[in-house]
Amino acid sequence: MVRCPAAKGYGMIKLRDLTKYYQTGVLKTFVLRNINLDVEEGEFLTIMGPSGAGKSTLLHILGMLDTASSGEYYFYDQEVHRLTERRLSDLHKNCIGFVFQSYHLIDDLTVYENLETPLLYKKVKGAERKAKICDMLDRFQIVGKKDLFPNQLSGGQQQKVAIARAVIMSPKLILADEPTGNMNTREGKEIMDMFRDLNNNGTTIIQVTHSEVNASYGKRTIHLLDGWIQK
């Protein structure tokens, strides 16, 4: 099992000439082009750009759910671009929490069971598992929802559960892909306030958003257009 690396003087993320394309015969369709990016531990970075700019693809590569066609990706001292799929999967599960617009909760599991799932995967023992879940339920103010199923919750409540599940293993990095896209203004503000609190407590956050309001929570913004970072 790959453990999450310690900082040891490295930046958290370094991308060098990262390119992603899909090839059909001799035709290459480029999604990302020569991306060079550094992210330090503790940053709150926003990625913006129009639909089709490559934002979600970049986020999925950062989250090790997808791989680049060429270029280099360093996560602390790990050469991600050289790792096997097994090691990529282990590094992702040990270091990264992912929050999606569509929540990705397991429909036939209760809130409690959804939170328990990553702990079971990591073989966390029963008493510690229960303590971690209770802490998340209390921290995200969803104690009264623990026995409900996702379809019994509002969009904001489902996203709270998704974020709680993403942070229950204390990841060093949270990646959020349009995390408030399906919410009203009040619910969206609650979620963004949670991200700000997590960041203030040391968690690195990278979010993709179309919202200038959500972007204002971050400390730095980069803009993508047609796969290029805009200077």
Image: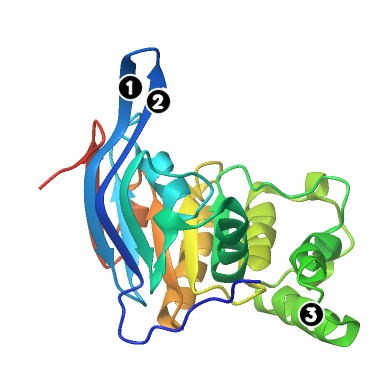
Mark 2 burial class by Cα count in 10 Å: few <14, some 14-19, many 20+: few
In front: mark 2 or mark 3?
2
* Quarter of the rendering containing residue 67: top left
**Which residue appears at 61% of the width and 57% of the height?**
89
Q: Which residue is mark 1?
A: 29
| Residue 29 visible in rendering | yes
Q: Secondary structure at mark 3?
A: helix
Residue at x 82% of width, y 79% of height: 129
Where 64 falls versus 138 (above or below)?
A: above
Q: Does 37 sit above or below residue 184?
A: below
Q: Position of residue 78 (x, y in %)?
A: 42, 69
**Residue 134, numbered label:** 3
Residue flagged by tag 2: what amino acid is it? Tyr
- Which quadrant, please, contains the N terminus? bottom right
Using the image as rendered, state which of residue 19 and residue 216 is in the foreground: 19
**Please, is residue 171 above or below residue 56 in the view?**
below
- Marks counted in the figure total 3
Q: Label 3 sits on what residue type? A: Cys
Report the front residue among 83 and 89: 83
Foreground of the two, 209 or 96: 96
Q: In the rendered structure, find residue 89 and report the number of the disc placed on it.
A: none
Q: Is residue 17 left or right of residue 182?
A: left
Look at the image and tell me whether residue 189 can be seen: no
Residue receiving disc 2: 22
- Mark 1 surroundings: few (<14), some (14-19) or many (≥20) residues within 10 A: few
Label 1, secondary structure: give it.
strand
Circles 2 and 3 in contact, beta carbons < 8 Å:
no
Between marks 1 and 2, how big is the CA–CA gap?
5 Å
- Are the two marked residues, 1 and 2, in contact with CB atoms closer than 8 angstroms? yes
Horizontal side of residue 195 vs 112, given as left or right: left
- Looking at the image, the residue that sits furthest to the left is 231
Residue type indicated by callout 1: Thr
